[in-house]
Image (tube, helix red, strand yellow):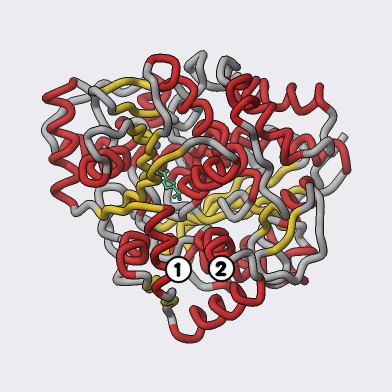
Amino acid sequence: MKYISTRGNVSKIGFIDTVLMGLATDGGLLVPEKIPQISAEKLQAMSQLTYQELAYEIISYYVDGEIPENELKELIEKSYGTFRHSEVTPVQKVKDNMYVLELFHGPTFAFKDVALQFLGNLYSYIAKKTGVTINIVGATSGDTGASAIEGVRGKEGIRICILHPHGKVSKVQELQMTTVHDESVLNLAIKGTFDDGQRIIKELFADLEFKNKYHLRAINSINFARILAQTVYYFYAYFQVAKEKDINSLNFSVPTGNFGDIFAGYLAKRMGLPVGKLIVATNENNILERFIKDGVYQPGEFRSTYSPSMDIQVASNFERYLYYLLDENPEAVTAVMDQFKSEGKIAVNEEQLRQVKGDFAAYGVEGEECLNTISKYYAETNYLLDPHTSCGVAAYETCNDSSEVCVTLATAHPAKFNESIERCDIEQTFPEQINQLFDKPQYLEVVEAVNDEIVRKLEKHFSSSPLNVK
Ligand SMILES: *Cc1c(COP(=O)(O)O)cnc(C)c1O
């Protein structure tokens, strides 16, 4: 298995180099040269596996022997051993034909742990194996930061710096990131939005001299390993629902920000999983909904919402989908992305729009509807949705036909977003791990959202005491 860039100017590389490169050096995103195809028979054989066994099977197609079997298995065991639920990502039936896939049983109570526990262990494995330095830098809308720090803290040979938008993340998200006292961890709170942070990170990675000098590594979902780890639970959810229901295909409703999670679903479908509709659920930051409805991809005004982890205007993984939409033609992707840079928008033609509508349904949830959905499900089913999952459920209600079976991805635990739950007049009990955070001191620096200042902080952090790699 080799990996190539969506823009065509990176020579083919293997899995580990793909993980280390993060953003492709030509500014594109790395994708597998060919998507592995899983036959119906093979799917049948996989259907009884545990989460960890299934993860091994799926991930193996992409690692393609670069990590020996026993070491890859160990890495997967370690990554999912930190989850509080024995099934890792259990499926819960909420109503007839309606399920949620609970992705929040990891250390930081959001779905990002599924990928970042794996990526943290993978980086640690690579550092030990090859002696390369791992300096991670990433931007977060709240959950990635906590999850990435949790994924790498205390691991030898790894330093991390996370940019989060100052004052624009939930209290629990902020505490999860900033109460970690470890000299390998630097939290920068930028005076700006997530999009500012993401743009700065993209620019740092595009500065190859800086990237190479400081061995910058990515943990955002531009890193293909994250997408890969997330494809596993689409398969897992399908098999769990199929155990209790005769299904020919299954819809998924996915709370979407950076298009990473939904792209993992798209990949699972392309691999042969019988996925019906992939429903893109957004909040008022609805660039993706507008694209799927009108074929025009154009950032709008940034809005702060009840679902802050989806407050994103420019979806970094969108380019991966564009690559397939444009028939895997890197010149066409480059032309379109150049146009996006100069004109600020992308418009697809009619035929392409038909394809988009065949691949996705979409619904953008407006504020009150998010809260109303939380209240309604709590009253009717006693199931407490977090505000992101609530957007997914509202989109399911709009886009799913009554005869179809749908799984909504529950991307976070409601305790992470109590600000929104309180607005619904619902009192929840916090898990002990979250309660404990409120007594701890915080470690962060507030900075302007400008490259120079952030570069200075990074240089200092990444030049501090040499790390021991055994
Ligand atoms: C990150 C996040 C999302 C959006 O996921 P993407 O992969 O960026 O589309 C949705 N919900 C929660 C709780 C998140 O943390």
Earlier-in-chain disc, 1 versus 2: 2
User: Label 1 belongs to which residue?
Assistant: 352
Where residue 119 sits: x, y (%)?
A: 65, 39
Circles 1 and 2 in contact, beta carbons < 8 Å? yes
User: Which image quadrant for residue 440?
Assistant: top left
Instruction: In this rendered view, identify the residue nearer to me: 258 or 241.
Output: 241
**Position of 469 relative to 315 (above/below):** above
Image vertical order of residue 222 relative to residue 127, above or below:
below
Q: Is residue 387 above or below residue 10?
A: above
341 or 274, nearer to the observer: 274
Residue 59 percent across, percent down from the top left: 68, 34
Tell me: 241 left or right of 34.
Answer: left
Inter-mark Cα distance, 1 to 2: 8 Å
Is disc 2 surrounded by few (<14), some (14 to 19) or many (20+) residues within 10 Å? Answer: some
- The kind of residue on which mark 2 rests is Leu
Residue 9 percent coordinates (x, y):
75, 71
Residue 467: x and y in percent read: 80, 43
Residue 443 is at least partly visible in this image: no
Location of the C terminus by quadrant is: top right
**Residue at 44% of width from left, 76% of height from top?**
346
| Residue placed under numbered mark 2 in the picture | 326
Say whether residue 204 is left or right of residue 311: right
